[in-house]
Amino acid sequence: YTKIIRLDPLNFSIDQLQEAVDLIKRDEIVAFPTETVYGLGGSAFSETAVRKIFKAKGRPSDNPMIVHISDLEMLSSIVKTIPEKIRKLCERFWPGPLTILFDKSDKIPDIVTAGLSTVAVRMPSQPLALALIKTLGIPIAAPSANLSSRPSPTQAKHVFDDLQGKIPLIIDGGSCDVGVESTVIDVHKGFSVILRPGGVNLEKLREYLPEIEMYREKNIDKLDEYSPQSPGLKYKHYSPKAEIVLIEGSIKFFEEKIVSLYSEYRLQRIIIGIIHTHKNIQISSEILDDPNCKIIYLGSLDSKTDSDNSINADKIAEGLFSTLRAVDNQKIDLVIVEGISDKKIGLAVMNRLRRAASKIIKE
Ligand code: TXA
Ligand code: MG
């Protein structure tokens, strides 16, 4: 049995979090909202709790989780040192969707970091998440609250769909604002890398860390000797049951691909989905009128004004995972998705889509 407690992030009292606090103190696990996605949390000091998290999600035990804190004092207790450069980043970006790697202290059990010597830490800005950690007085270890490999949950009902009966409590704080997970970074002496793009943009980070690069870019030769990669990178992710074909290129290219892919796949008598991100795309009436073809509009990119993703790409990020989940609810077998530019939050959106796609077609 999974209980759901509905709370308003802008108007709640600490008493209303007491049940969650008590559960976590007893080494139980609780799903809670953050500004990025819902997390499935337990005490970061409890091996028992962390084992329950891995089990409920079906998560491979070599994939470490993020430790969530509510203030910098908590940070000091779980890491060996806080380098000056990183302290500045914490001050600028916390609370918020940025996760930073630190050398872990002995207080964090190895199971949390999957045996790595580093621990990933972030301070969420969602008021319910912050209050939960603060009231508990203990950092919370939490991965996203989805079944492993499914799209991350951005609403309590997504958590319920994946984990009902497996966890005692979900705190429902409504929809998550950012909609994609936090940016995970590793800052070293000589270089800084983004292990996972997310809620904080590369462009924003560059203002503070001009040298920062996406991990895996071939031009960083220093990275050859960089071994502690993010284990999460190797797993298939974010996937609905439907097959995803991602189209990267101009709007014209996308329109052409819709026509050719539609005529190819229609013969297989499957349900086809088309997810478009730009407002005004041309789709023939044959496709529009086909009951076995579902057109889904994600976000509201306008090709004339949003070429640098500065206006409405945030909306696409916010709706991305619930749209991928909706694809399954509509029994779509194959979905053709219009990619967006890698600028700003687009980098995180495209990272998720590329990893969910079984086929990518580039112009
Ligand atoms: O926004 C978020 O980050 C959400 C909310 C709940 O905070 N959490 C989240 O956690 O997305 P999860 O477990 O789904 O993703 C954490 C990522 C994984 O790719 C994992 O491999 C990486 O962070 N990670 C965790 N600890 C690490 C470490 N010590 N070194 C390298 N990568 C690490
Ligand atoms: Mg996850």
Image (spheres, rainbow, N blue to C red):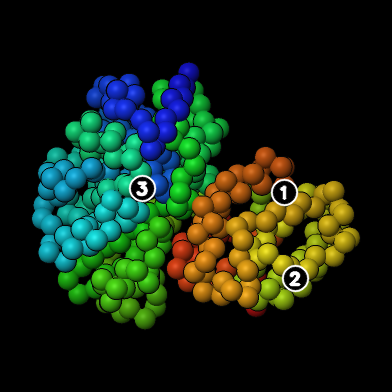
The residue closer to the viewer here, 52 or 160, is 160
Residue that carries the numbered disc 2 in the rendered image: 255
Q: Is residue 88 left or right of residue 354?
A: left
Mark 1 or mark 3: whose residue is earlier in sequence? 3
Residue at horizontal 46 percent and vertical 45 percent from the top: 176
Q: Of the residues shown, which amino acid type is indicated by label 3?
A: Asn
Mark 1 residue element: loop
Question: For the residue carrying disc 2, how many other residues have a C-alpha within 10 Å: few (<14), some (14-19), or many (20+)?
Answer: some
Residue that carries the numbered disc 1 in the rendered image: 333
The residue closer to the viewer here, 301 or 28, is 301
Question: For the residue carrying disc 3, how many other residues have a C-alpha within 10 Å: few (<14), some (14-19), or many (20+)?
Answer: many
Tell me the quarter of the picture where residue 184 sits.
bottom left
The residue closer to the viewer here, 19 or 363, is 19
Mark 1 or mark 2: whose residue is earlier in sequence? 2
Does the Cβ of the disc 2 residue fall within 8 Å of ligand 2? no
In the rendered image, residue 338, in percent from the top left (x then y), is placed at 65, 65
Does the Cβ of the disc 3 residue fall within 8 Å of ligand 1? yes
- Residue 150 versus residue 258 in the image, above or below: above
Q: Is residue 135 left or right of residue 81?
A: right
